[in-house]
C-alpha cells in the first residue's frame, strides 16, 4: 500500500467477497437443490461446472469441479495431499485442519481412523473413497439426504447441510430445529 | 513415510466454528495471495503456487504466516519492493508512488470472470478410457506438475477423463503445447499401502504421460 502497488479498496473488495459472498452456504444451497430436484441432481453429478453456474457460483479456485455422491454403500471424502486445494466458490476458505499435515497425510492412509476422530464411525460394509484434489480438479461431496425430511423446503434443507458433510468428514443428521412447511 | 512417522503427525486438531481469520492482517494475507492469482497480476508476480514459492520449512508457522512469507519472497524476487523497504515499512527515499497494480475494477472483473486458466480447447485424443487398468510411472517428475508421489509404481483404474488441460511447467509459465488429458485414477487402498481395508480406495489426478496401459 505504501508503495502504491495496491489500492486498499481492492483488497477490501476481496476480503468482503470471502466474508460475505462465498462460503459453505453456497454449497449447502446447491446440495439442497439437488436433494429437492432430481433433474438438477443429475446435472450436478454429470456436468457439475454448468450446474453450479446455474446457481451463480464458480470462478477462482473452483474452475473445474467434480461432485461425488454419498450413498448407503459408498462414503466419499476429500483431501488435498499436495497443499490445500479446496472449492472456494462453494465452500469458502478451507478450515485449518484441512490444511494441516496430519489431515493431508493421514486421510489417504487411514481414512476410517481419521473419520473416527471426526466422530464418524463407518460400518465395515461401507466403501470409503478418498478424493485427492489438485489445483485443476476440486471435489465436493453430495451428502445423503437425511430420512424424514420429505416436504421440507429447499431453504430448510440447506440449513441442515454442513461444510464438514460436503468435505465428507461428517454425515447430516435430521435436525429437530429444521423448519417444516 | 513409515507407519511410525505418520502416527507421529498426531490427531487432527478440530475447532468448532473456526473463523475465516482471527485478525484483519490474516484476511488481508488471504486477499493479497488471491489477488496474486488474478491473471493480470501474474504478469507482475508470475505464477504463484506452493511449488514456485515454497512455504518456509517451519512447522511452527501457521497457514497465514506461511502465505505472508511467500508473498514477501515473491515481492522481493520480482523487484516490486526491497528488503530495506519491507523492514522500514516505507518506500525508499526518492521513489515515486507506483500506479496501483491491483485496483477495484481489476478485482470486479476477476470476480465476474468464469475463465478456467488451465482448461484447454485443443483437440487431443485420449490415451485411456474409463475403467481401463493403468500403471503409474515410477519416475521423478517436475514437482510443478502438481502430482502426488504416492501412487508411483502402482496399478489403478481410470475413474474419469477430465479433458485437456495445460500442464503446469517447471518454468512456471503456461505452455499450450504441453497440454494433455488429465485423468482421475482410482487406486485400491491395498494396492497403495499393503494392509488396508479391502473396500477402500484413493482417487488421484494424474496426467496421461504418467500412465501406462496394461
Image (cartoon, coloured by chain):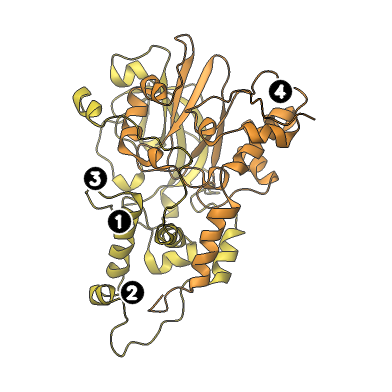
Residue denoted by label 4: A149
Label 2, residues with CA under 10 Å away: few <14, some 14-19, many ≥20: some
Task: State how far apart marks 3 and 4 are (Cα).
Answer: 44 Å
Label 4, residues with CA under 10 Å away: few <14, some 14-19, many ≥20: some
Task: Tell us which disc is closer to us: 4 or 1.
Answer: 4
The relative height of residue A27 versus residue B94 in the rendered view (above or below) is above
The mark found on residue B208 in the picture is none
Q: Chain of mark 1?
A: B
Task: State how far apart marks 3 and 2 are (Cα).
Answer: 28 Å
Task: Tell us which disc is closer to us: 3 or 2.
Answer: 3
Discs 1 and 2 lie in a common subunit: yes
Tell me the yellow chain.
B
Give the image quarter of residue A114.
top left
The mark found on residue B59 in the picture is 3
Residue denoted by label 1: B53
Looking at this view, name the residue that lies furthest to the front. A177
Residue A43 visible in rendering: no
Task: State how far apart marks 3 and 1 are (Cα).
Answer: 16 Å
Image coords of residue B30 (percent x, y): 43, 57
Looking at this view, name the residue that lies furthest to the bottom. B94
Residue at x 67%, y 18% (from the top left corner): A147
Image coords of residue B37 (percent x, y): 45, 59
Dot 2: what SS?
loop
Amino acid at each position: 500500500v505504501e508503495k502504491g502497488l495496491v489500492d486498499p479498496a481492492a483488497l477490501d473488495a476481496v476480503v468482503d467477497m470471502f466474508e460475505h459472498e462465498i462460503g459453505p452456504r453456497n454449497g449447502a444451497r446447491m446440495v439442497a437443490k439437488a436433494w429437492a430436484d432430481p433433474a438438477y441432481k443429475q446435472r450436478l453429478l454429470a456436468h457439475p461446472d454448468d450446474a453450479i453456474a446455474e446457481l451463480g457460483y464458480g470462478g477462482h479456485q473452483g474452475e473445474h469441479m467434480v461432485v461425488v455422491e454419498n450413498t448407503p454403500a459408498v462414503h466419499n471424502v476429500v483431501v488435498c495431499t499436495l497443499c490445500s486445494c479446496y472449492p472456494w466458490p462453494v465452500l469458502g476458505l478451507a478450515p485449518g485442519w484441512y490444511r494441516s499435515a496430519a489431515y493431508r497425510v493421514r486421510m489417504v492412509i487411514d481414512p476410517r481412523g481419521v473419520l473416527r476422530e471426526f466422530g464418524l464411525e463407518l460400518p465395515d460394509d461401507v466403501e470409503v473413497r478418498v478424493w485427492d484434489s489438485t489445483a485443476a480438479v476440486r471435489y465436493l461431496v453430495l451428502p445423503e439426504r437425511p430420512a424424514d425430511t420429505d416436504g421440507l423446503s429447499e431453504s430448510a434443507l440447506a440449513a441442515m447441510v454442513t461444510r464438514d458433510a460436503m468435505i465428507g468428514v461428517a454425515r447430516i443428521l435430521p435436525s429437530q430445529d429444521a423448519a417444516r412447511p | 513415510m513409515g507407519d511410525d512417522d505418520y502416527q507421529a503427525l498426531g490427531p487432527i486438531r478440530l475447532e468448532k466454528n473456526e473463523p475465516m481469520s482471527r485478525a484483519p492482517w490474516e484476511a488481508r494475507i488471504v486477499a493479497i495471495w488471491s489477488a496474486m492469482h488474478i491473471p493480470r497480476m501474474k504478469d507482475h508476480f508470475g505464477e504463484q503456487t506452493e511449488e514456485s514459492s515454497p512455504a518456509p520449512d517451519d512447522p511452527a508457522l501457521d497457514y497465514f504466516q506461511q502465505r505472508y512469507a511467500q508473498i514477501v519472497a515473491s515481492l522481493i524476487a520480482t523487484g516490486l519492493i526491497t528488503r530495506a523497504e519491507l523492514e522500514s515499512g516505507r518506500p525508499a527515499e526518492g521513489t515515486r508512488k507506483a500506479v496501483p497494480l491491483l485496483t477495484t475494477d481489476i478485482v470486479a472483473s476477476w470476480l465476474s470472470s468464469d475463465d478456467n486458466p488451465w482448461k484447454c480447447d485443443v483437440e487431443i485424443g485420449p490415451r485411456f478410457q474409463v475403467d481401463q487398468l493403468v500403471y503409474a510411472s515410477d519416475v521423478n517428475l517436475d514437482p510443478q506438475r502438481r502430482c502426488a508421489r504416492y501412487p508411483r509404481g502402482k496399478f489403478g483404474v481410470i475413474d474419469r477423463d477430465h479433458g485437456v488441460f495445460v500442464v503446469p511447467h517447471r518454468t512456471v509459465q503456461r505452455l499450450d503445447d504441453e497440454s494433455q488429458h488429465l485423468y482421475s485414477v482410482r487406486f485400491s487402498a491395498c494396492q497403495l499401502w499393503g494392509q488396508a481395508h479391502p473396500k477402500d480406495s484413493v482417487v488421484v489426478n494424474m496426467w496421461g504421460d504418467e500412465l501406462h496401459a496394461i
